[in-house]
Every structure is written in structure tokens, then in C-alpha cells.
């Protein structure tokens, strides 16, 4: 067992973990923060997306011990049913989900995607590497690591555009 | 309540809550991660141990020897379930292969053991130490090679294996224009986001299972049968389901093994089927070979149509009923359909979203495109010319309950700008993209299933609905709440809906796109019973009582629901059953898909640029979630057209690409904005809701529209799905 | 996943030493590939040395006018670096063509070079695979090989190298800088870094036990139009069927490197030399010695088509 200290959603937690424990399982099984989902456990679906030290990552493909002392934000840290984060609210309004299982990962990703665009991080569809700007195609590309088999894609893009203040509607 | 005559005016027609676009009532729970799925019930089973499934390394044969010594000695191991210690197990009615194999092995990755340990990490590590020696046997894994050994399959949801009317051979021989082609579709995987998962806990001889299951009553029954215990001793709880698409219609290995593991180790056990195990351990949509022959006059009017289908499954399994739609979609006095089933020792084939039509239309609607071209008739017009308002196998005495295919074709074509399509292939370019448009009819049978609910009003006037109906993303929570709100005259936020618990009345469950219409009809029945009770308590004549604004009114008098319910509350339970309206009337849902693709002129990469459709599905209960169902299904159709295929290794007998990296489904970047129009329709012969299914209609024909658009863009006609770069390049070179 | 012990290294020297002294030790950086494989017991390290906090996360100019990229620089940061975007556009493009935003936020420069194949037979431990289990045979050769390599393959292995980044690195003549367990440093040209499978497909690089990658250096920028074209079955989040990294010079010269088709990132002098003759000639030169199966023979024409597409775009620009 290895001691691990994390700050999860602003709360400091101390855990004793088998080093094999993924960050995802530390959240779901040890901290009982089950909002973060296990869809594939192999970095192939994005359902486990959380924000660590300000960046979105797949929590399934990282060990909790590797994040000792770090800040983790999960879907539970973004908002609650009574006080939704604007992105959560937009997902409800635009029906940006169906079964709901990929949804926390989509939302964590979406929040980070808007930050990444602001920070000028290029993407595969960025025409000019020096000019990174919001567009629906940019969002589609950047969200592609979050699979939604119910395929609320069209609605998710609407929700993110809404939050970005770029809605066509 | 029995529904055996067409519905007259009823409280649903008010359309105050029903038919209005509502946000999902379960939305806030889902977007905040507070909706707890099966594996996440720390609240219900706080001390659950962890199970990990060991799957077979061979496709067919026997276990020669099994050595558990190392696994048992591994840290944290609490027990190991195998066929040798599980006790006598039967097989569920809905299962083809046994969920726990051994000593006989029926398919690759069939569960042969469950290792239970104190932690997830220990269970997974110990599972790798289970040593199994196999005595492999030869199996059959190649559908094309086995095709001639096909037999007539047993009858399932799709009706009889073979049908015929008139004289197909004679009429086809004489036809002025003929299309005769063979199409193939591959095995496909549901790839729902939540793996199959269950937590089992025993209390004496009573089993509780927190699970992810579309059909609660079926699966309780199959668990009872498999374990040999009374179903009264089993409770399933499945309030949130992370996608199903048919994969969770049945009891699966996670559920059975969790129950067996919990019994063996004497504490709750949780099991999820690991993602790389899912494609081979669970069910899949079977591959098909489809031969279509259409004979028409020079104007494209069909006189003869035949659709023959070959698919495979394990011994005792069923066929992929891909000719279903061809029985009802187009006119033609001379027709035949046939399904043949071959034995394959691949994993179990079974239902995936719109079994039958989803792949049947991938063939039929391309054949129609080929006919349109052969006749020089616009594809939309061709379909209009071949519309038929009655079951063409049975004749005019069996009309459709409602059929607005032509309206969908016209409205969809208008909205999409179909008139801008150049009918000559390979003519339109946009930069490096060859651009083409394609369309296809959408068709899916409408099934109705008995469904029950209980509904109550509490002392504060709030309404509660309980039914074992499930919400697999379909929006059941919301449409059931809308139905209750409409029936009892309260606002949506006054309704609480509880689903997915086998303690609640048995519903239709989620399958075959019958869920929305059938389950709300069940709520309608229960609500009618409650209205009668409330009216009686108020002293009003039930027929004259009006339910609105939380009040029961008659004339100038009114009483609140709250006062009538009293502190005890007032409950009623009923179910909706169906007579023979589905025999007297053909019942189906219709639509038209339109798609514009770009095909890279050099690399043959295909990208969907625009996609839209018009659909007629009876009353649309919640246009918001119904639209989502349709776009989701359209996307699955894009996947079927362009990328989805389980690759069969015919030497080892397994699906090679058994994870989400290698079995590719569409991602955000593949899907443009999708446009959905619902054509106004009420179907009074379907149910008192006057609704029909919509959850599967969207996949039916979507892939064919993509295929036809590729043809229009390039002039390349592919008939072997998925339509990937390698096939396009080969066809181009040929 | 087999049990392992875990330590966080405090210095490069200590990390290298620890790795050499513990049998079965592995470095872990981003973990996005290693943990994936450990869960399936394709990789079974007994000891993990976490190198994430060694400070190897800087991008600096070299005296020669090139760029030194720390081994731990994340894919996202490398792609977004202003110098890389301006002077090594092909690298930026290749990086963002790979994986997903989440994975790129973790995956590192060194880790990406060590990324292992996506061959499905490698990924299923019940199947024969000489790379995973030497001597067990190759399941892919007569199996499902649509995604696999056609260049540099052998009878023992037809696995493809999956990286996008490494293809651009190969194009740019990067050097891999390492430190050995005894503290010796060396710089390995990327052309020599990856090994072809031959009879020993389990040996994938020239790294010695304990040797740790400290940085990757790029020579002076190569002027011209930098492009990376990746062809795959879906629009994103998928490995390449074929990818081409290219720099087109103003004088009609060009250089090319290929992904998705090689046992390692593929580049030949002959292909570069054929640049002025167009896509067909370049493809022919690049594909010399190609060996295909019935499932992946489409990669031959696809290489040419992808090149044709790049030439077409290049002409449109000119």
C-alpha cells in the first residue's frame, strides 16, 4: 500500500492504495465519486475524463500514485443538480446525452476544450497553426476522444457552442 | 385494460404536456454524475467484493483440465466460481449459449470462471493465474463458406422465415427492368458505453441484483431458471442503464456470475465484463448475405420483388431477419422472402438496434437506388411510385394503421434540397471532395407489448409512477412523467417516476422500439384506473370528471388531488394489453433519410457533410428526446455504412478487433449537424397514446442513404459493408 | 495487472541506475500506452520508476539552431509550442493527428517514440505473437492484417508502428538523447533508433537496459511547406491506415516520411530523390520491398493516392 494525497474537487483526501490502482478506480471505488465513468478502461472511449492540474486526461490510463499532491476536478466538482455548472445546464437544455454514461466525461472534456481553444492549442482541423479560434468543426475534432454511442453529438456541439457564446441559434 | 378497438378522443389528446419538448427529468442527475449505474451502488452494497471473468481462449471444445491453485493462492482471493463448483445450472430461455461454460466450450471468451477478490486489482491479477488446458474441436466460422448449409430458422419476433405471394419467378422473368444483386453486412457490436455490470447480494435465499438490463422481467425469469430458484426470490434493480441497443435485453454473464460469486463467498460481489471481453463474450448483430431481385416496368413500378437472407448463429440460435421490411415496404403482386440459418461457432448472435431492418435496408435501399438508375427515375419518385397503403402480401384487406411514407419522402426531400442533386454520378466537386447525395426510405415495424404500471397521488398532491420499465437513454423517465402529468392534470415537476425495479409492475421493457408507446400506454391504463378512484372518492361521475391544475372538477365543483388522496395516498395499478389490431392492420413506422457525402478524390476517405430526414411515427411524445433517438440511430447507421465491422478470424473463430480502439464507431468529427422533421401523425390503432416506436426507425435506411450518396459522388457501387477506403480503391482500380 | 513496486525518481541518474539494477523495471511517464498494456498483461513490469517529475519538460533552442525537446514534454505542449508551430509545423500537425486531446495531455515525447504496435494479435494474449511471446508464431500473417505494416516486415512479424509523432520526427532527422545506467550519454539518430522485426520482433529499439531518454533534438528548421496527412477509417481518434509527413521546398525538392505502413516510421532517400517526379514515382521508391497481405495490399495504392493529394494541394498553393 502506498499513501496518496489528492485534492479532489477542492477537498484534500488521504488514501492508502495498491499502486496498481488507476486514478479512475481511486475515484470510483475508494472515494466513491462514481460520476466519473469506466467505459473501456483502456483510453478508447473518454468516459473517464477528469481534469487534473487544469488539464483533461483519461483517468483510466494513469495511476493514482502518480498524482500524489495534485488537484483533481471531477464532474461532481463542476456542479450539483441544484447548482449546475453552465456546461451541465447546457447539456440538459440541448439534450446533449441520452443514456448518460459518457456524459460526465463529455462535460469535463467540453469545459477543457473551451480552455484549450482560448489558450491557442492547435488541433487537427486548425487551418493556420498560428490562428486558433472557436468553430464547430474545432469542437467536433477536439471532442472526438469522447465517444457517445447514443450519439448525441449534434446536441453536444450545440451545448458547447451555447456555453462558448457562439451558438448559431 | 385491453386495447382492441381504435382509440377515440382521450385525455392524451389534450397535448398540454404530451407532445411538448421537455428537458429530461433525469437530466440533472446525469449531467452531475449523481445518477448511479449498476456498478456504482456503494450505497446498496457497501462491502462488495470484486469479480473478474476468465474467458475461453478457444472457440469450441472442452476444458481438459483447470488448475486454480495459483489463482486461489493469489493475494486477496476469496473464491473462484467454475462449472465444477457452481452447482446445477440451467440455461435461460433467451440465452443461446451458456453464460458459464465448461466443461463444454461453445464460443471464444465464453466465461469459464469468475475470480472473486477483495479488490479490483487483486481479482484481475488472480484471474490471469487461472490455468486452463483445452481440448479444442473444429468449428465453423465462415458464413460465406457455410451458406449452402442453411436451414429454415425458428420463428422469432420477425414472423415466419419464409413468405410469398403471387408468382415471383414468372413475374421477374418477364420484367422489363431487373435488379439482381447480392449484398453483405458484417457482424456488428453494440458498443454501448456502459459495460455489462451487476452487483449481487444474497440475503438467505433471496437475491438482489443491481444491474444494467433493458428487460427486467425477462431477465428475472431467466435468472430464476438458470439458478433453479423461484423468481419471487429475485429482485432486479436497474434504474439507470448506460446504453443497451439490444446488448442488455437478456441475462448475461456479469449478472449470473455476480450471483454465483456472491453465493460462494458469502458477501456481495460486483462484476463488470471488461471491455476487451465484450464483443466475444456477449451478443452481436450477425453478419448477413442478402440476395435481392426486383422486377419492374420501365417506369420503375415494381411487379416482382424477392429478398433472401443468410445468417449464422450457434446451435439453437436464430436468424437475422433482414427481409422483414421487404414484406411491407413496396408494392408488387409477386413476391417472396426467405431466411436461412447456418450453424456457426462464433459468439452468440442476437438483437441489435432494429434487428432485421437495420441491415435489411442496407441492402434493399441500395437495390432501390440501383433500380432508380436502371429506370432513369429519381430515387424519391421511384419510392413514391411504389408506395402501397396495405400489406402487399396480404392484400387490401389488411391496410396500414397509418402510413405516411410519401409525406416523409416529399417533406424530407424539400428540406434537404434534394432537387439540387445531380442524378449523374461523379459530377460534383468541392475542392478535393467529390460530392454526392443519397437517400433511402426508413421503415421499422411497430410492435406493441403488454405493459403495466402503478400510479399514486400522495397527500401533497404529488404523483408517483412505478413500473419496471427501463430508460436506456430513450427518455422513458420523461415521457412516463409526461403521460402521468397529462392524465392527472398536474405539472411535470409534480411527478416522480421510479423505474427498473422488479418489485414494480411488469412493463414492456426496452426493446424492439416498443418501449415508449407500450410503457406509456401502461401508465395510461393505470392512470385511468386512478382517475376512476379519484372521481369516485370525489363523488363525481368518472366520465365527466376533468383533471386539471391539480384538481378534479365536475361542472363548477372541484377538489384537489391532495385532499382526495389524503394522508394515505391513493394508488391504482393496471396494464395495457393488446387485441388483434396488429393482425387487422399492418403497423409500422416510416421515414426518409437524406445524406450528402464528400469522397476524397485521391484517398477515397468518406465524410458525411449533411444528413437529415423526415419521420412519421405516430404521436411524438417528447419531440426533444425523440429527436435525439433519431439522430443517435442515424449516426449508428453512418457507422454501419462506413466503419463498423467485427473482423472474423476464421482460423481461431473469434472477433479479432474486440475493443473500442479497433472496433470503430463514429466519433464527434464524423457527424455533422443532423436535421430531423417529424411528420404529423396520430395512429389510433397502435395504442391510446396514438404513438408508435421511434427509437430504431432512425437507423433503418440511414446507412443505405450514405451508400447511395457515395455512389452519386463517385459512380462506385459497393455492396459489401462497411464501405471502407480499401474497397473503394479496389473498385476504382477495377 | 501484475503487482509491482513503485518509486518516484528524483534524478535522471538515479532513475537510470534504478532501472538497470531491478530486473523487470520500467520507466513510466504518461502511462497511456504502458498501463493499457499492463492491464492486459502484455507488459508485466515488476517495478515502475515514475519519471514524471524529473524536470525533463522544457523545450529549448540548441546552439546549432535546432530545438531540444525534453523527454517529458507532453504531446499537447509540444504541438502548441510557438517555435514548433512556426518552424516545425509538420511535427505540430502530426502530434494533433494522433490520439485524443486527453491522451495528448498525458502522453510524452519519449513515451510516444516507445509506443507499441496496435496489432490485434499482439493485443490478445491468447493469440500467437512473436513480438509479445517470442517463438509463439505470428497470428497476423495469415490472419486479419488490414491495419498492419507492409514495409520492414518479416516472416516473424508484420506489426505496424502506430505513432504519428515519430513519423514527423523521422522526417525532421531528430536525434534521441539518452543516458545509460552508468551515466553515459549518447545521441541516436532516429533512423537508427527503432529496430526492424527480423527474427526478433520483441526487440523494438536500440535502448539498453536502464537507458533513459532525456530529450529529442531537432536540427535547424527545414524551410518549406510542412504537411502531415493522415488517412484513417474515421475522421479522428483512430490510428493511421497510411500517413505521410512531408516538407515541400520552394525549389521542387521535398522529403517524405510515412506512417501506418512500416514496422517503424518509414523514410527512404530514394523517395525523397524522386520528389520532382511526382506522387507515383515517390510512392514507387518508398514502397520498394513492400510485402503485402490480401487485407493490406490496398496500402500500396493508398500511399500513392495520399501523396497525390499532397502534390495536388501543393500545386494549388503554388
Image (cartoon, rainbow, N blue to C red):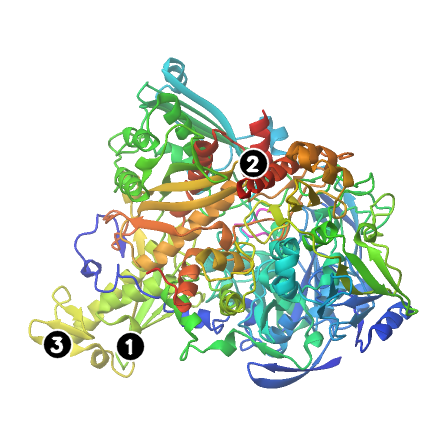
Residue pictured at 48% horizontal, 25% vertical: B181
Q: Secondary structure at mark 1?
A: loop
Q: Are marks 3 and 1 on the same chain?
A: yes
Q: Position of residue C292 (x, y in %)?
A: 73, 34
Foreground: B581 or B186?
A: B186
Identify the residue position indicated by label 3 in the image: B558
Q: Chain of mark 1?
A: B
Q: Position of residue B588 (x, y in %)?
A: 33, 42
Foreground: B360 or C10?
A: C10
- Quarter of the figure that contains the C terminus of chain B: top right
Range of magenta residues: B91-97
Q: Secondary structure at mark 3?
A: strand
Does the magenta-highlighted stretch encompass residue B251? no
Residue pictured at 68% horizontal, 74% vertical: A64
Q: Residue furthest front?
A: C251
C-alpha distance separating marks 2 and 3: 74 Å
**Labels 2 and 1: the sequence-earlier one:** 1
Query: Mark 2–mark 1 contact, CB under 8 Å?
Result: no
Within-10-Å neighbours for mark 1: few <14, some 14–19, many 20+: many
- Dominant secondary structure of the magenta stretch? loop
Within-10-Å neighbours for mark 3: few <14, some 14–19, many 20+: some
Foreground: B63 or A71?
A: A71
Amino acid at each position: 500500500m502506498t499513501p496518496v494525497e489528492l485534492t479532489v474537487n477542492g477537498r484534500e483526501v488521504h488514501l492508502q492504495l495498491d499502486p496498481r490502482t488507476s486514478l479512475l478506480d481511486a475515484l470510483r471505488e475508494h472515494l466513491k465519486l462514481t460520476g466519473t465513468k469506466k467505459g473501456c478502461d483502456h483510453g478508447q472511449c473518454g468516459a473517464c475524463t477528469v481534469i487534473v492540474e487544469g488539464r483533461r486526461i483519461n483517468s483510466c490510463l494513469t495511476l493514482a500514485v502518480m498524482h500524489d499532491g495534485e488537484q483533481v476536478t471531477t464532474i461532481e466538482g463542476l456542479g450539483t443538480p441544484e447548482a449546475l455548472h453552465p456546461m451541465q445546464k447546457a447539456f440538459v437544455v440541448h439534450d446533449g446525452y441520452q443514456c448518460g454514461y459518457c456524459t460526465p466525461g463529455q462535460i469535463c472534456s467540453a469545459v477543457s476544450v473551451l480552455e484549450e481553444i482560448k489558450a491557442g492549442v492547435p488541433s487537427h482541423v486548425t487551418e493556420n497553426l498560428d490562428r486558433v479560434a472557436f468553430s464547430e468543426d474545432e469542437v467536433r475534432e477536439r471532442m472526438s476522444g469522447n465517444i457517445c454511442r447514443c450519439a448525441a453529438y449534434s446536441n453536444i456541439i450545440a451545448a458547447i457552442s451555447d456555453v462558448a457564446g457562439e451558438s448559431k441559434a | 385494460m385491453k386495447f382492441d378497438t381504435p382509440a377515440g378522443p382521450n385525455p392524451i389528446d389534450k397535448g398540454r404536456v404530451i407532445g411538448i419538448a421537455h428537458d429530461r427529468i433525469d437530466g440533472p442527475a446525469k449531467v452531475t454524475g449523481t445518477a448511479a449505474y449498476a456498478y456504482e451502488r456503494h450505497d446498496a452494497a457497501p462491502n462488495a467484493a470484486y469479480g473478474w471473468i476468465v474467458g475461453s481462449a478457444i472457440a469450441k471444445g472442452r476444458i481438459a483440465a483447470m488448475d486454480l491453485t495459483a489463482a486461489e493462492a493469489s493475494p486477496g482471493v476469496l473464491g473462484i466460481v467454475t462449472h465444477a463448483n457452481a452447482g446445477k445450472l440451467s440455461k435461460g430461455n433467451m440465452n443461446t449459449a451458456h453464460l458459464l461454460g465448461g466443461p463444454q466450450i461453445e464460443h471464444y471468451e465464453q466465461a469459464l470462471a469468475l475470480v472473486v477478490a477483495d479488490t479490483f486489482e487483486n481479482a484481475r491479477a488472480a484471474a490471469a493465474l487461472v490455468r486452463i488446458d483445452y481440448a479444442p474441436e473444429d468449428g465453423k466460422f465462415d458464413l460465406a463458406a457455410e451458406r449452402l448449409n442453411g436451414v429454415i430458422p425458428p420463428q422469432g419476433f420477425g414472423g415466419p422465415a419464409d413468405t410469398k405471394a403471387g408468382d415471383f419467378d414468372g413475374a421477374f422473368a418477364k420484367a422489363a427492368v431487373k435488379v439482381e444483386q447480392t449484398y453483405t453486412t458484417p457482424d456488428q457490436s453494440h458498443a454501448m458505453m456502459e459495460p455489462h455490470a451487476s452487483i449481487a447480494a444474497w440475503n438467505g435465499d433471496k437475491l438482489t441484483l443491481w444491474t444494467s438490463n433493458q428487460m427486467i422481467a425477462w431477465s428475472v425469469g431467466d435468472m430464476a431458471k438458470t439458478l433453479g430458484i423461484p423468481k419471487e426470490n429475485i429482485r432486479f434493480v436497474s434504474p439507470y442503464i448506460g446504453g443497451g441497443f439490444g446488448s442488455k435485453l437478456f441475462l448475461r454473464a456479469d449478472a449470473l456470475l455476480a450471483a454465483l460469486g456472491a453465493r460462494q463467498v458469502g458477501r456481495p460481489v460486483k462484476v463488470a465484463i471488461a471491455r476487451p471481453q465484450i464483443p466475444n463474450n456477449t451478443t452481436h448483430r450477425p453478419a448477413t448475405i442478402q440476395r435481392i431481385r426486383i422486377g419492374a416496368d420501365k417506369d420503375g413500378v415494381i411487379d416482382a420483388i424477392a429478398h433472401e437472407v443468410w445468417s449464422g448463429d450457434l446451435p439453437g440460435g436464430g436468424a437475422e431477419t433482414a427481409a422483414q421490411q421487404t414484406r411491407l415496404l413496396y408494392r408488387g403482386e409477386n413476391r417472396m422472402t426467405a431466411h436461412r440459418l447456418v450453424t456457426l461457432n462464433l459468439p452468440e448472435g442476437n438483437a441489435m438496434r432494429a434487428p432485421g431492418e437495420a441491415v435489411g435496408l442496407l441492402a434493399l435501399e441500395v437495390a432501390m437506388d440501383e433500380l432508380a438508375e436502371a429506370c432513369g427515375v429519381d430515387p424519391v419518385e421511384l419510392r413514391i411510385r411504389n408506395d402501397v397503403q396495405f400489406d402487399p402480401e396480404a392484400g387490401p384487406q389488411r391496410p396500414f394503421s397509418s402510413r405516411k411514407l410519401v409525406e416523409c419522402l416529399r417533406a424530407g426531400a424539400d428540406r434537404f434540397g434534394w432537387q439540387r442533386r445531380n442524378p449523374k454520378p461523379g459530377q460534383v466537386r468541392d475542392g478535393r471532395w467529390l460530392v454526392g447525395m443519397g437517400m433511402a426510405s426508413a421503415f421499422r415495424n411497430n410492435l406493441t407489448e403488454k405493459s403495466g404500471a402503478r400510479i399514486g397521488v400522495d397527500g401533497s398532491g404529488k404523483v408517483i409512477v412505478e413500473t419496471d420499465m427501463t430508460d436506456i437513454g430513450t427518455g422513458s423517465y420523461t415521457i412516463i412523467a409526461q403521460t402521468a402529468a397529462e392524465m392527472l392534470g398536474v405539472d411535470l415537476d409534480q411527478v416522480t417516476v421510479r423505474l427498473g425495479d422488479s418489485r414494480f409492475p411488469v412493463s414492456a421493457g426496452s426493446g424492439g422500439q416498443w418501449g415508449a408507446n407500450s410503457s406509456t400506454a401502461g401508465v395510461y391504463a393505470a392512470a385511468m384506473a386512478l382517475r376512476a378512484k379519484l372521481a369516485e372518492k370525489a363523488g363525481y361521475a368518472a366520465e365527466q370528471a376533468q383533471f386539471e391544475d391539480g384538481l378534479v372538477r365536475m361542472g363548477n365543483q372541484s377538489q384537489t388531488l391532495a385532499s382526495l388522496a389524503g394522508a394515505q395516498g391513493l394508488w391504482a395499478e393496471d396494464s395495457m394489453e393488446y387485441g388483434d389490431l396488429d393482425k387487422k392492420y399492418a403497423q409500422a413506422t416510416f421515414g426518409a433519410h437524406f445524406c450528402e457525402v464528400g469522397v476524397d478524390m485521391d484517398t477515397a476517405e468518406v465524410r458525411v457533410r449533411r444528413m437529415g430526414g423526415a419521420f412519421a411515427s405516430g404521436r411524438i411524445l417528447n419531440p426533444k428526446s425523440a429527436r435525439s433517438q433519431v439522430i443517435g440511430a442515424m449516426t449508428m447507421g453512418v457507422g454501419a455504412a462506413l466503419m463498423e465491422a467485427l473482423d472474423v478470424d476464421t482460423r481461431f473463430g473469434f472477433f479479432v478487433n474486440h475493443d473500442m480502439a479497433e472496433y470503430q464507431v463514429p466519433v464527434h468529427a464524423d457527424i455533422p449537424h443532423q436535421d430531423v422533421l417529424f411528420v404529423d401523425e396520430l395512429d389510433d390503432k397502435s395504442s391510446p397514446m396514438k404513438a408508435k416506436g421511434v427509437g430504431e426507425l432512425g437507423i433503418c435506411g440511414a446507412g443505405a442513404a450514405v451508400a447511395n450518396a457515395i455512389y452519386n459522388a463517385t459512380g462506385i457501387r459497393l455492396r459489401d459493408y462497411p464501405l471502407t477506403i480499401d474497397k473503394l480503391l479496389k473498385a476504382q482500380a477495377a | 495487472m501484475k503487482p509491482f513496486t513503485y518509486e518516484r525518481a528524483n534524478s535522471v541518474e538515479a532513475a537510470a541506475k534504478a532501472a538497470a539494477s531491478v530486473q523487470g523495471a520500467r520507466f513510466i511517464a504518461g502511462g497511456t500506452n504502458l498501463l493499457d498494456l499492463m492491464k492486459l498483461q502484455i507488459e508485466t513490469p515488476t517495478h515502475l520508476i515514475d519519471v514524471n517529475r524529473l524536470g525533463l519538460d522544457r523545450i529549448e533552442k540548441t546552439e546549432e539552431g535546432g530545438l531540444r525537446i525534453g523527454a517529458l514534454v507532453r504531446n499537447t505542449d509540444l504541438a502548441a509550442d510557438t517555435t514548433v508551430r512556426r518552424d516545425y509545423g509538420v511535427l505540430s500537425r502530426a502530434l494533433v493527428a494522433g490520439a485524443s486531446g486527453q491522451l495528448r495531455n498525458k502522453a510524452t515525447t519519449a513515451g510516444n517514440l516507445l509506443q507499441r504496435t496496435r496489432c490485434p494479435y499482439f493485443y490478445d494474449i491468447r493469440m500467437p505473437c512473436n513480438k509479445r511471446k517470442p517463438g509463439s508464431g505470428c497470428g497476423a500473417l495469415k490472419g486479419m492484417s488490414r491495419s498492419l505494416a507492409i514495409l520492414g516486415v518479416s516472416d516473424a512479424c508484420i506489426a505496424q508502428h502506430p505513432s504519428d509523432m515519430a513519423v514527423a520526427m523521422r522526417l525532421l532527422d531528430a536525434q534521441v538523447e539518452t543516458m545509460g545506467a552508468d551515466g553515459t550519454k549518447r545521441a541516436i539518430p532516429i533512423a537508427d533508433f527503432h529496430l526492424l522485426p527480423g527474427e526478433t520482433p520483441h526487440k523494438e529499439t536500440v535502448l539498453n537496459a536502464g537507458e533513459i531518454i532525456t530529450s529529442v533534438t531537432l536540427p535547424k528548421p527545414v524551410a518549406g511547406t510542412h504537411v502531415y496527412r493522415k488517412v484513417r477509417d474515421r475522421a479522428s481518434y483512430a490510428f493511421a491506415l497510411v500517413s505521410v509527413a512531408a516538407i515541400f521546398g520552394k525549389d521542387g525538392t521535398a522529403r517524405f516520411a510515412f506512417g501506418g505502413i512500416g514496422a517503424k516510421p518509414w523514410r527512404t532517400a530514394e523517395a525523397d530523390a524522386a520528389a520532382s517526379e511526382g506522387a507515383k514515382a515517390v510512392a514507387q521508391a518508398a514502397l520498394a520491398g513492400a510485402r503485402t497481405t490480401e487485407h493490406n495490399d490496398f496500402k500500396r495504392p493508398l500511399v500513392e493516392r495520399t501523396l497525390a493529394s499532397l502534390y495536388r494541394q501543393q500545386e494549388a498553393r503554388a
